[in-house]
Image (cartoon, grey):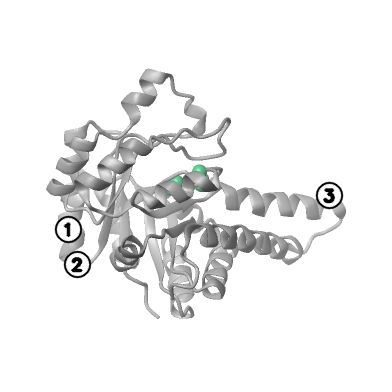
Amino acid sequence: MPFGSFKAVLEDAKKNGYAVGQFNINNLEFTQAIVEVANEEGAPVILGASEGAIKYMGLEYTAAMAKVAAETSRVPIILHLDHGGSFNMVMKCIRAGWTSIMIDGSHYPFEENLTLTKKVVEACHAIGVDVEGELGRIGGVEDDLTVDAREASLVRPEEAKQFVEATGVDALAPAIGSAHGHYIGKPNLAFDRLAAVRDITGVPLVLHGGTGIPDEDIRQAISLGVCKINVNTENQSAFTDTIRAVFDKDKNVYDPRKYLGPGREAIKEAVRTKIRLFGSAGRY
Ligand code: 13P
């Protein structure tokens, strides 16, 4: 089938209390693994492509690969720009075939983030492209924030209301203390903020930094309005650890299929675990 609708799969997740996985793609093996397991599990999936990954794979290659993945799938597959940094990048992706995008203006002051996101939503909605915005700052685990800095990075519910109403975003990623990468300690999610943002905005919410969040926290986040969860690092680690083990066992391997194949299988199992945890299995 053609690309699925970002808005439709998130609305279904919101109505039925589960979350759709956004699994980031870094190469062909990631794309194949994610789409294969989505079909085996009957789960919709969002393929996230960051600007870095697009630069690595090539804009047209990324779009073409995801398009074939969707066309050969019986479950909805969506190609999503992850953390799009500019209006120009959004336009490039749409021209190449993307049907949903994230505009991340969270490194700008609130008003500037709102203005940029509104401009992107106006352009995207005019041509049927769905938009995710970000509010507060979702950093990396390496940021190691002080208590005050953490507080300052978290979403403010009253700003979230203003932001959603003014921009018209289809989904919102509120910063609630999750981070990208492997957590050093136990993540400390601000569930009270999440609940307040859900109550005040009503839009599907997105949890970034899905790697390493304990299962019970994932379930609680879903119960408080999270409809989309982003995972990348965990799949990267599964892929790389498996390839490393192949080399450790046999230093003379030279055929890429002999190590990329097992790497792809490892991603499949990591994604399967997440799909089941998120409650998205058997929905399609
Ligand atoms: P992780 O790499 O921590 O899983 O986060 C992925 C993400 O949030 C992409 O936007």
Please name the residue shown 39% across and 25% down the image: 150
Label 3: element kind: helix
Q: Earlier in the sequence, mark 1 or mark 3?
A: 1
Tag 2: residue type? Answer: Ile
**Could you tell me residue 281's position as x and y percent?**
50, 68
Q: Relative to 1, say whether 131 is above or below.
A: above
Circle 2 packing at 10 Å, graded few (<14), some (14-19), many (20+), is few
**Number of other residues with Cα within 10 Å of mark 1, as a class: few under 14, some 14 to 19, many 20 or more:** some
Whether residue 242 is visible to the viewer of this picture, yes or no, is yes
Can you identify the residue that label 1 sits on?
A: 123
Between the residue at mark 2 and the residue at mark 3, the CA separation in whole angstroms equals 51 Å
Identify the residue under disc 3.
248
Q: Is residue 72 above or below residue 208?
A: below
Position of residue 203 measured from the top left corner of the image (x, y, whole percent): 25, 53
Point out the tag, 2 or 3, that comes first from the N-terminus: 2
Residue 144 has which mark?
A: none
At 36% from the left and 72% from the top, the residue drawn is: 4
The x and y percentages for residue 122 are: 15, 56
Which of the two residues, 262 or 153, is positioned nearer the viewer here?
153
Q: Which residue is mark 2?
A: 127
Mark 1–mark 3 Cα distance, whole angstroms, equals 51 Å
Q: Mark 2: which secondary structure?
A: loop
Instruction: Please tell me whether residue 185 is drawn above or below residue 46 in the rendered image.
Output: above
Q: Amino acid at mark 1?
A: Ala
Q: Residue at x 52, y 70 (%)?
A: 38
Rendering coords of residue 143 (x, y %) = 47, 27
Task: Name the amino acid type tagged 3.
Answer: Asp
Q: Residue furthest left?
A: 166
- Relative placement, left or right, of 266 versus 76 is right
C-beta proximity under 8 Å, tags 1 and 2 = yes
Query: Is the residue under label 3 in contact with that under label 1 (CB below 8 Å)?
Result: no
Quarter of image, res 227? bottom left
